[in-house]
Amino acid sequence: MKAQLRANTDLHALAQVLAWFDQFNHSMIPHPVWLQCQLALAEGFTNAVRHAHRGQPNDTAIDIEVTISDGCLEIRIWDVGAGFDLEKTLAKLSQEVNYEAEGGRGLKLMKRMADVLTYTRTDDERNCLLVIKKF
């Protein structure tokens, strides 16, 4: 099963993204796994809006794809930002403990939840956040 969604660069679009993701909440996927993936999707989408697309027009597209196959749920989120080194950022975040910080916990949360978490530049000059969760 595969589905795709294009959303605007707007935090208000998160409700649309999460409503779209509801179609994957069924008996084939254990509910705790679905909840973790829903959280990863929300974090990935809001990071794309707040960081990757900072300063971009609201109609800048964020493409999302969810694929379910053979006990695995994959989420891909594409942005057109400058990109960053996910592994270096995660290593830096793991050394810093700032309980007052407003951000930074989402990436660590996604890393703990996912079986695979990558962020790579694609041939079409976009970045793709890939979250894979096995169940």
Image (spheres, grey):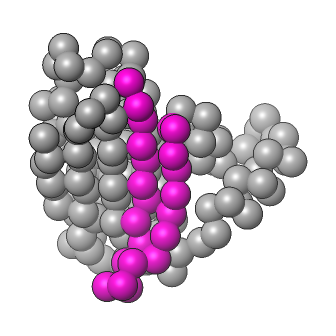
**Range of the magenta residues?**
114-135
Exactly how many numbered labels are in the figure?
0
Res. 78 in view: yes
> Residue 99 in the image: x percent, y percent?
78, 35
Q: Residue furthest front?
A: 70
Q: Is residue 33 above or below residue 10?
A: above
Q: Main secondary structure of the magenta part?
A: strand
> Residue 37 in the image: x percent, y percent?
38, 33
Where is the N terminus found, in terms of image quarters?
top left
Kindly identify the residue that appears in the image at 31 percent across and 16 percent down: 30
> Residue 102 in the image: x percent, y percent?
65, 44
Where is the C terminus found, in terms of image quarters?
top left
Q: Is residue 134 above or below residue 61?
A: above
> Residue 69 in the image: x percent, y percent?
23, 38
Q: Is residue 48 above or below residue 40?
A: below
**Camera-nearest residue between 102 and 94:** 94
